[in-house]
Amino acid sequence: MTRKTRRNPKQARAQATVDAILAATFELLETEGEARLTTNRIAERAGVSIGTLYQYFKNRDAILTAMGERQAEALRQKVTEIVLAAPGQDTIRTIVQAVMSGIDGSPETRIVLMDALFRTHGEAIMIQHHAAFVESIRVRSDLDFVLGRESAFVLTHAVVCLLRAAAAEPELELDPVALEDELVLLIGSYMTGLAARAEKLAG
């Protein structure tokens, strides 16, 4: 007889507490900004004691990192699903749109979460998501021409790094619609070039 695996009440309460802390942090970032974000204010907004908060997170940076990791993982899965469905120019725009909107919140909140990830993991965070993305699309034989180490690196880093730079330079007042078009052109042209090169080498 197969025994069903259930989350016990203690696990469910723990997850609910973590979710409440992350949700409270997001709300405070959006309404008051990073400068006023403290663990005491987070605990108060989440409805938990400061002692309970520290049971799950050692400091404010740990909370921000957890938020960034959760959103980055959700984004990676979403992009992977798009790529596996059907590659093409329309797919490229869908991916760019997903990445541009993949981290919730204002531009200020997005840069806070990205910075937290880089402070905690360094450039290794890009390597981790790059490796996971490449592994997830390896089953697509028609994408072999983009799976070289260098070309895959360019594809997985270009949009993310450019958007990180755009978020860090709000004074440029970049038009999101125009930026989307430029990113689609960049990635689309690169993939067209990869395909042409692969065809030439095969001939």
Image: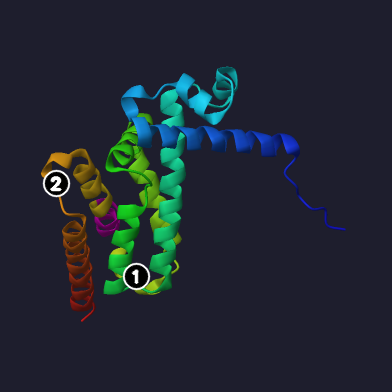
- The front one of 58 and 170 is 170
Residue 9, relative to residue 184: is it above or below?
Answer: above
Residue 72 in picture, x, y percent from top left: 41, 47
Amino acid of disc 2: Glu
- The front one of 195 and 116 is 116
- The front one of 47 and 103 is 47
Q: Quadrant of the C terminus?
A: bottom left
Locate residue 106 relative to residue 201 in the image: left or right. right
Q: Residue at x 34, y 72 (%)?
A: 87
Residue 164, relative to residue 17: is it above or below?
Answer: below
Residue 13, relative to residue 131: is it above or below?
Answer: above
Q: Quadrant of residue 133?
A: bottom left
Q: Residue at x 58, y 20 (%)?
A: 49
Identify residue for label 2: 173
Identify residue for label 1: 143
Task: Verify whether residue 149 appears in magenta.
Answer: yes
Amino acid of disc 1: Leu
Q: Which residues are magenta?
A: 148-157
